[in-house]
Image (cartoon, grey):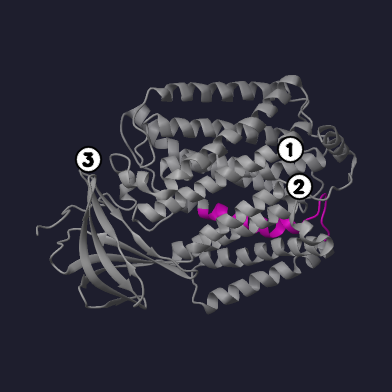
Amino acid sequence: MVSFFPANPFAAGAPGVLDGPGPNPLLQNHILVMFHPPILYLGYVGVTVPFAFAIAALVTGRVGEGWLIATRRWSLFAWGFLTFGIALGSWWSYEVLGWSGVWAWDPVENASLLPWITGTAYIHSVLVQERRGMLRVWNISLLVATFSLTILGTFLTRSGVLNSVHAFSESGIGAWFLSFFAVVLVVSVFLIGWRGDKLRSPGAIDSPLSREAAFLANNVLFAVFAFIVLLGTVFPLIIEALQNRQIAVGAPFFDRLTVPIGIALLTLMSIAPVLPWRKASAETLQTRLFWPMWSGVAALVASLALGAYGLAPLLTFTLGGVSGGAALRQVVLATRRQGLRGLVGRANGGMIVHLGVILIAVGLGASNSYSKSQELSLVTGVPATFAGHSFELTDVIEVRDDRSTSVKARVIVDGGKTYEPAITKYTRIGMNVGTPSVKASLTSDIYLTLEPPIRQDSGTARIKVFIKPMITWLWIGTGLMAVGTFLAAFPGRRRRPTDATSAPVLVAEKIIN
């Protein structure tokens, strides 16, 4: 038998497949194709409703808090679908592309991340406006940015200007999307400027140690985060348009600039839930931070005991412990007062979302910092070891159908189940596509890919093994975020107004309900 697939289909690098000439055909055959695009689409479309209300408020001059309350659930569910759609896309990439990662900073991935970033800032910021009547310009601007970025993301995906595994072929529809994007921005900025006097907040931040100040800092960090991602995504397009040359902005640019922002956001997540509105006293902070700080100490000690090292991951684990303790503290207090009803409502459902975010942050910190990989040349019946795991090749098989020819290596991992990483050649387009095989667990994934060239009758196979710590916690965290979003969409116990600025909010609630 002659050798199969002498050229490495991932020669452009991992995620080299992402930089290839066209869409990966295997993407169209994976089960997640049934869920990832439509769910992400629901997130994009859902943003239209609160955006329409915001524009209507600007046009009519009714820029108070009523429209926020009317669109609360729309905003939450749109954000939830966007979150879940992005997470499914990451899982899709992990299961299909064979590079063992979940996020490659691919331009089309970034196009979906951008409205999520501004939408997340908006979901937090509206709490301040509803409670204190503040941050009105911020909130309308964030909502305009979120809707505009969904249009920009659609343009980047559908116009063909980007070379991406997610992108469609070149199409004339891109010019229409770009024109609509420009119209939305120009009209929205004009309306915000026109209603500037009415958008002035009746209240002001009383202290930097208050929940309002924490949400404002949250807005600033998310705005910087969005600017970095947007700059890295569109800068190559700008250079190509102006200078007719191609450049690439890779993962190191994004990692170097976004990791500090992520750590700063985790710090805010540790402090904001325990801050009161208006002003925090030293005694209040000391009392409310007692258990969260001890949770952070416990997380740090446990991390060191398990062999963790490095400043960034240790900070992530420690801050994850503190923010997790802060979120759990609020959930425990709420359930003590109201039983299971305490889990319902935006504040406590939001804490469930925070716990999901923390699990994702810790999972990313562990998998990005402590992953291991090794290429093994396996011979049939001869076990090999790597990172405390054993791998034994039992067979190399060929599977044919009318669309493709696949070569699969059958590998027993740790003396148990057999896994089958493969390379498939699609007959009509002549493209070779690798398919990984993954042994998942709560502690770490064992991720196998088959490396070309391979001879079916040689009794050997080159297998690349990746050990990916805590990847599974990304999907668990996503599920927890989905649950928290659902709980947050239902009204919790209503509070009476704490000051004059919050009274209009309750009046609006009564009118709408």
Question: Label 1, label 2: how many angstroms apart (C-alpha)?
Answer: 9 Å
Question: Label 2, label 3: how many angstroms apart (C-alpha)?
Answer: 57 Å
Q: Is 277 colored magenta in this rendering? A: yes
Is 445 or 183 nearer to us in this picture? 445
Residue type at mark 1: give it.
Answer: Leu
Query: Between tags 2 and 3, which lies in front?
Result: 3
Is 144 or 284 nearer to us in this picture? 144
Q: Earlier in the sequence, mark 1 or mark 2?
A: 1
Q: Is residue 14 left or right of residue 367?
A: left
Callout 3 touching callout 1 (CB < 8 Å)? no
Callout 1 touching callout 2 (CB < 8 Å)? yes
Callout 2 touching callout 3 (CB < 8 Å)? no
Q: Please provide the residue range marked out in magenta.
A: 259-281
Q: Is residue 378 above or below residue 351?
A: below
Q: Which residue is mark 1?
A: 135
Residue 255 is situated, as x and y percent measured from the top left of the image, at 46, 53
Q: Secondary structure at mark 3?
A: loop
